[in-house]
Amino acid sequence: MGKKNISTATSIAGVELDSYVCNASGPKCTTYEELTELGRSDSSAIVMKSATILPREGNPEPRLARVGKHGLVQSMGLPNLGYEKYVGFSKKLTKFGKRIIGSIAGFSFEEYVVMVKAFQKSDVDLIEINVSCPNIEGKSLIGRDFGQLRDLLTLTSGLGTKPIGLKLPQYDDPAHWFTVAELVLEYGVSFITCINSIGNTLVIDPWTRKTVTSKNGLAGLSGETIMPIALANVRAFYELLGGKVSIFGVGGVIDGVSAFQFLLAGADAVQVGTAFELNDASCFTYINKGLIHMLEYHGFSSVEEAKGQLLYI
Ligand SMILES: Cc1cc2nc3c(=O)[nH]c(=O)nc-3n(C[C@H](O)[C@H](O)[C@H](O)COP(=O)(O)O)c2cc1C
């Protein structure tokens, strides 16, 4: 079969996406101009920056620095325009005819509830609840504290009919994968997004002896280096959730090869953060084309056929 016949169309929580590749919340998706740029690109969805109740300036500069060729550390501090703006943007963005995904990040359970209710009434197709940044002051990340995660799910599931997903932090303890998978199934979470950037990492410039980002230098690591961790999380949840819950794979997707690796691990679609931040919107076209080459090389005719087809040696 010629490669023109291979489609990478897929779906997340029953919502169809024209291709396997879209942007991740954060990089270049904060302003209306940036979101329209995504609307015009080959990203199969417009994923919006995580919104908070009030607009935020974020942390002082420098708050983003390169690590190696394909990596970043960032301590952005959730700069965004406030959720009401994103609810408004969702209506205007429908003109692009592609899926719109709202992302929310609260500093309390009440804030999450207010924002879930608002996005449920908006024009977004999916709602991604970010439980991997920030943390409620004095407490662990919600995604790392399963009591808090249960409370949040109790409060937010059943607030509307739009599918709700969780943007998860990375786990490396099988017991944690198991507990989160149980909660996801118990509360009917429609999709999960694995993984957020890896928090609280430290990069030191040996020549200046300085940190590379402001404040105490602790920052979230993203890009190619975190891909093996992201793949392990996708695979673990793919096995535990048994296809009942859709999975967005994110973390280090830079080309068709890495997108294909997420597909083998079991991701229903991938999101691209760092590669978009460091390049331009043509990355979505490039990654999708590369994925088609990989499918063709392995003799698959659709993403569905290749999904989860990891082989063990
Ligand atoms: C500059 C920057 C800002 C980010 N902001 C958010 C955010 O607001 N909400 C969120 O859920 N993830 C955020 N992320 C995390 C990304 O969505 C993604 O999970 C992570 O970067 C790993 O993917 P990547 O390796 O493709 O970048 C941000 C990442 C970067 C680099």
Image (cartoon, rainbow, N blue to C red):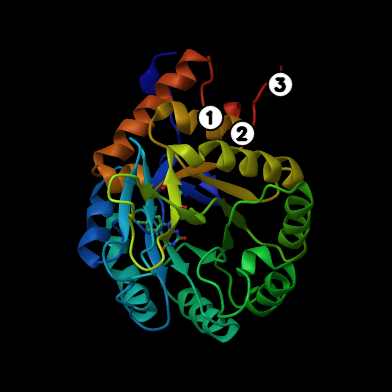
Mark 2 Cα-neighbour bin, 10 Å: few <14, some 14–19, many ≥20: many
User: For mark 1, what is the residue?
Assistant: 261
For the residue pair 186 and 11, the one nearer the viewer reads as 186
Q: Looking at the image, do the residues carrying marks 1 and 2 touch, with CB atoms under 8 Å apart?
A: yes
How many marks on residues?
A: 3
Q: Is residue 202 left or right of residue 33?
A: right
The quadrant holding residue 213 is bottom left
The answer to whether the beta carbon of the residue marked 2 is less than 8 Å from any atom of ligand 1 is: no
Ligand 1 position by quadrant: bottom left
User: For mark 3, what is the residue?
Assistant: 312
Mark 1 Cα-neighbour bin, 10 Å: few <14, some 14–19, many ≥20: many
- Helix, strand or loop status at disc 3: loop
The answer to whether the beta carbon of the residue marked 3 is less than 8 Å from any atom of ligand 1 is: no
Residue 70 appears anywhere in the view: yes
Please name the residue shown 65% across and 73% down the image: 157
User: What residue type is disc 1 on?
Assistant: Gln
Please name the residue shown 66% across and 63% down the image: 144
